Amino acid sequence: MSNKQVKNLTIDDGFLSLRCLSPKKLRFEIEYALGKGTTSNSFLFFKNNIQSAVLINPPGANFEEVFIPSIQRIIPKDIEELLVVIGHINPNRVHLLRHLSNEYKNLKIICSNPGKKLIEDLWTQIKPSKESVNEANKLVIPPIPEIKLIKQEETISIFDEYLLTLIPSPTARWPGGLITFEEKTGLLMSDKLFGAHICTDEWAERNRSSTEEERRHYFDCLMTPMINQVHRIVEKLELLNISSIAPSHGPAIESSWRSLLNDYQRWGDQQSKGSINIVLLFASAYGNTASIADALAKGISSTGVHVESLNCEFTTTNELVNAISKADGYLIGSPTLGGHAPTPIVSALGTLLAEGDPTKPVGIFGSYGWSGEALDLLENKLRDGGFDFGFNPIKIKFSPNAEMLKTLEETGTKFGRKLIKEGRRQERLLGGGINATKSDPALLALGKVVGSLSILTAEKLEEETKVNSAMVASWISQASFSPPGITVAVAKDRAVENLLHTGNFFALNILNEQNYQKLLKQFLQPFAPGADRLSGLELLYTPSSQPILPEALAWIEGCVKQRMECGDHWLIYAEIKYGKVLNPNGITAVHHRRTGANY
């Protein structure tokens, strides 16, 4: 596939799934980082002899040029009533709703109360971008259609044949969340929950393992910072008589849907057990500030620090006070609207200044279109309040690109590591400065397991931008003869981990005992977030364009085939097709450790 398209699949009589497919990722948000495209799934109930239809979860503006004609081929413009059930609200979806409203004069919207507020806020606004002026000149904005509110779980009948249960499912990221369950078919249309950004023709996944990596990546990027809210929703869904789940993104889950619910519980439990907590406060008018928050939160979470995300526009003062009082650090992000911070952010800032601990680190971030006064306000007020900044204020014009997302995630990782380091320092002080675990006999024995010293390098083309990274690796082992394969253990908080998903290539530069010190020093130095670890080095390249260090003893090129979660590391299995010994007389450098408690 090279272009966007819509595939209509019949689920039942008068019940269709309209699957918008894009083989290329649509945006630079961090959840699209695997580069496997996406699917946007919407659902349509209609009868040829009845002048009404129900559309559930239409896509955003990215699919407008293929989705609108597809709908028009099924639903006539003069239909008496077109009901649109919509959960998560963002500028792209509102853009498409406006277009639909221009085409269908009898369109009505069904959404939750927070969803209604977001629609009203966004209906006449244009997302700031370089093309905004041209967009404004072309845009014809119809009146907001009639809106039916879903304030609590409600069941509606369609054509006396289908029963739709509408379940409000608000989260920090999607306060207007609305999940739909159809009783006759047992189909749960789960909106953002359980999704995965992967483009596939198939209606449903072959088995759980076939999309587990993509669903886990999606979960880590979006669900982890609001896991308590997600758990509450999942518990409610388990009471339904589900036969299959169809999220807004990715293939449906049929026979193994209960396994996925269990995975959501397990993945969330891993993160919520963190002893260090960050509260992330944000508001996002156009989605850009939320994208920055997602990248920072993913970086922090990779260190094992728990992040709790709160949307200030839909969070009570009591909830803010409670979260701030329990936090070990704070992040606060804001857009700039009309030269000001949104009122909910100003209120949250006041709460943070009153209830927060200035000795705990804080970070501020946000996006802006033509000015950035909101970020200046946050910075000045927090500095005047004596707060310690964990990183320099992050101010991004419009939306972050691939390179900036990498920098944001690494900034979050550095922030999380700083908190962990401080926590360990306090533990040593309380324990008299003795770290007993390092002298554990089993760990001392484990330290006698040795590995070859190598530099792992990886590079990936993201649209027009090259993203690369590298790390010192010593937990390496040959894993198979046919095909030749190796395993590499990579800590979850390593910057290069994002470039080591299934299908990605990398190079393993095996170091020479005679000259490895210089390279080791180069790659063990602390790098600033987003820094190019290969800058200034003379490089060769593998057949798949992975960086080779000429000073290495040998190199091999690997293609990632599997990933297995192992505590605080990912175990990467890669097949080897190319390699070369650069110095036949050299000897492999080996890493000897005193204890198995650290590298």
Image (tube, rainbow, N blue to C red):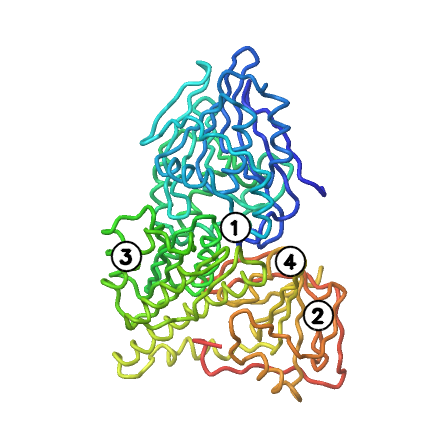
Left or right position of 134 against 565: right
For badge 1, the amino acid type reads: Pro
Residue matched to label 2? 556
Dot 1 falls on a residue whose secondary structure is loop
For badge 4, the amino acid type reads: Glu
Mark 4 vs 2, N-terminal side: 4
Image x and y of residue 559, in percent: 67, 60
Callout 4 crowding tier (Cα within 10 Å): few <14, some 14–19, many ≥20: some
For badge 3, the amino acid type reads: Ala
Residue matched to label 3? 323
In this picture, is 217 found above or below 554? above
Image x and y of residue 324, in percent: 27, 60
Between the C-alphas of marks 1 and 2, the distance is 45 Å
Residue matched to label 1? 128
Mark 3 vs 2, N-terminal side: 3
Q: Which of the two marks, 3 or 2, is nearer to us in this view?
A: 3
Between the C-alphas of marks 4 and 2, the distance is 23 Å
Between the C-alphas of marks 3 and 2, the distance is 48 Å
Mark 1 vs 2, N-terminal side: 1
Question: As rendered, which of 586 and 51 lies closer to the eye?
Answer: 51
| Circles 4, 3 touching at the beta carbon (< 8 Å) | no
Between the C-alphas of marks 1 and 4, the distance is 23 Å
Mark 1 vs 4, N-terminal side: 1
Dot 3 falls on a residue whose secondary structure is helix
Callout 3 crowding tier (Cα within 10 Å): few <14, some 14–19, many ≥20: many
Residue matched to label 4? 462
